[in-house]
Amino acid sequence: MGSNGSNTVYELDRLCNIKDVKVGKLYKGVITRTEKYGVFVSLNEQTRGLLRQREMAGRRIEDFKVGDEVVVQVIDVRPEKREIDFRYVPLREYRVEKVRKAVPPTTIKEILDRGLVDMRGEVVRIVGEVIQIVQTPGPTVFTVTDGTETAWVAAMDVAGLRAHPEVQVGDIIDVTGIVSIRDGHLQIERLELRKLEGEEAEKARKIINEKLDKKSEPYRDIPFLVDSPVLEDLRPKMARMAKMIRRAILDGRPVVIRHHADADGYCAGIALERAILPILSEFSPDVEAQWHYFRRSPSKAPFYELEDVTKDLVYAMEDKLRFGQKMPLVVLADNGSTEEDIPAISQALAFGADVVVIDHHYPGEVVSGKVEVDSYVSCHVNPYLVGGDSNLTAGALATEVARMINKDVSDEIKHLPGISAVGDHAKGKEAEEYVKIALKDLTKWSRNYGSGKEYTVKDLEKIALCMDFEAFYLKFMGGRGIVDDILAVNKREIYRHEKIIDILYRRAKEMIDRQMQAVLPAMKTEKLENGVVLNLIDVERYAHRFTFPPPGKTCGFAHDHVVKKYGEDTPVITVGYGPDFMIVRATDAVGEKYGFNLNRIVGELARKIPEASIDGGGHECAGSVKFVEGLRDRVLSSFIEVLRRM
Ligand code: MN
């Protein structure tokens, strides 16, 4: 006790606990319970002790009421039992001194490393960025990252009100609270929460940012599956994309994959999906993270359509409003490189999403390493940017990026580039290498877990065809799980893949045969003076509609049929047309000998007949063109005129 009659009485702040209480000292407390043998005195919410009858300095239990403020002296502390014994001290004059507990800041990783069970009940302090805010029927839950790991901070407030309305997603907060465990993850029950402002916030943000940046570093030097100068030239861009995707996951930003709805597009989408999902589960405290922070959908059109972006934005906005989520990182695969993609991409950007593109379609003229879409997207991987071409498929590019995101996924996905190469009729050294890898890999797994057969190129063609077949019925759905089996990504269950392929292939083949039966007799073949074999099909009148195979594929199969008859080296062009569109397929010989480039011809025609609103393209030797219905005959005859004069 102090001297000169001015006794010091200590008052605990809300962070202090039994360990901060000293024997002999005086404390200010409140009666919180009365019993037959004494009364309980609380020094703060979490620190309570017993004042027995014999220590009441002559007063009786009945003299104390719940809610009374009292001064007590500590006569014994037993922290292991969470027990304190008090003596009542009837003081009139005293000086109050606050006991403020300074909890040194720690990192979320340190808390986890010390073991959640051991840490339970401890008071900790962290500084982190809020990446999501959810108002539950109970507390408001802030998901916070400090750059080392992610944790929840739960804050109770008056029922029904959001705690700390001043705190928004993206803010930096300094939280002191009690360690608890929810769903097996760290949840800090808030005792004190302060939003950092100004310079203090910026300093903390910088530290968090540096840590996240380091953690999102991809496997940028991983050897590619094949030797390829084009891939090596693309490596910096690919590593950048891998890093952006990893960073999005760490930032709690949803990843949305949009890919073309064909075999190559699905290969690309699945490769990325298989790399991303395990990382999401590892980094996010949300057990349902792979459903809440990831979505993959196909795009029917060969570009990112306004319909697609609208759907993506509606979902993203709803998630933002309902679950406090950030706007997503949109990854366009086997799509996204062309001028046609720009309206949808601009919309996504306007709403706060970011867009990256991994594609192998002709992106327009490359000027000092850049194309038009580069002014809109945050990262663009396309072989044309480094002097390559579409023979490096989107499936191959995405598989290599997926391995940079998550190197452990290689064995699951390394056969996908081979399937995509066959599906997209890719040629060249890389494509051949990828096909070899796929054959070797699938044969190995089939021997261990499947029918034990030796895989051939024909099998890869079957898989690609079945993927196209299924894509027709999946329409706008991603088909997670189903697609994994068709593309043989679940290698231990390759027996199921083989069964499914048998069933799908038989059915697809029947439907193609039926279509060819209708189409081939109606096809008009003409040998032009310059030696080009031109086939024309009216797919509107002489093909089954709204069924598999759709017009593009129908034209492709008819084209293949003719090519088989004349041989690969013959210049063959097949044009399938409907009321307001045409589909074009050409053999490589047409490109090589005649300089045929569909994209360039489309540009020329569009300038020549502006009123036809001609639009489209694709690869040099395969693509589709749209125009105004009334001008079809003029567009068609102009197109054929170009072919005659090649
Ligand atoms: Mn493709």
Image (cartoon, grey):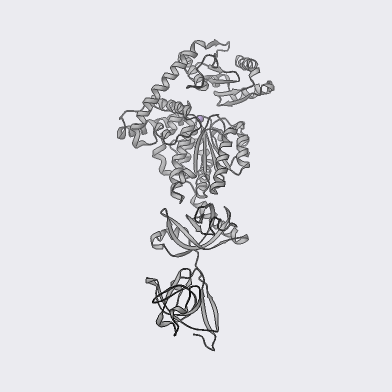
**The one of 149 and 337 positioned closer to us in this rendering:** 149
For residue 307, above or below residue 130: above
**The one of 7 and 488 positioned closer to us in this rendering:** 7
For residue 552, above or below residue 86: above
Q: Residue furthest front?
A: 62
x and y percentages locating residue 176 in the rendered image: 51, 63
- Count how many numbered circles sit on residues in the image: 0
x and y percentages locating residue 473 in the rendered image: 47, 27
For residue 149, above or below residue 575: below
Residue 630 image-quadrant placement? top right
x and y percentages locating residue 549 in the rendered image: 48, 21
Q: Is residue 41 left or right of residue 382?
A: left
x and y percentages locating residue 31 in the rendered image: 47, 74
For residue 183, above or below residue 552: below
Which quadrant holds the C terminus?
A: top right
**The one of 87 and 119 positioned closer to us in this rendering:** 87
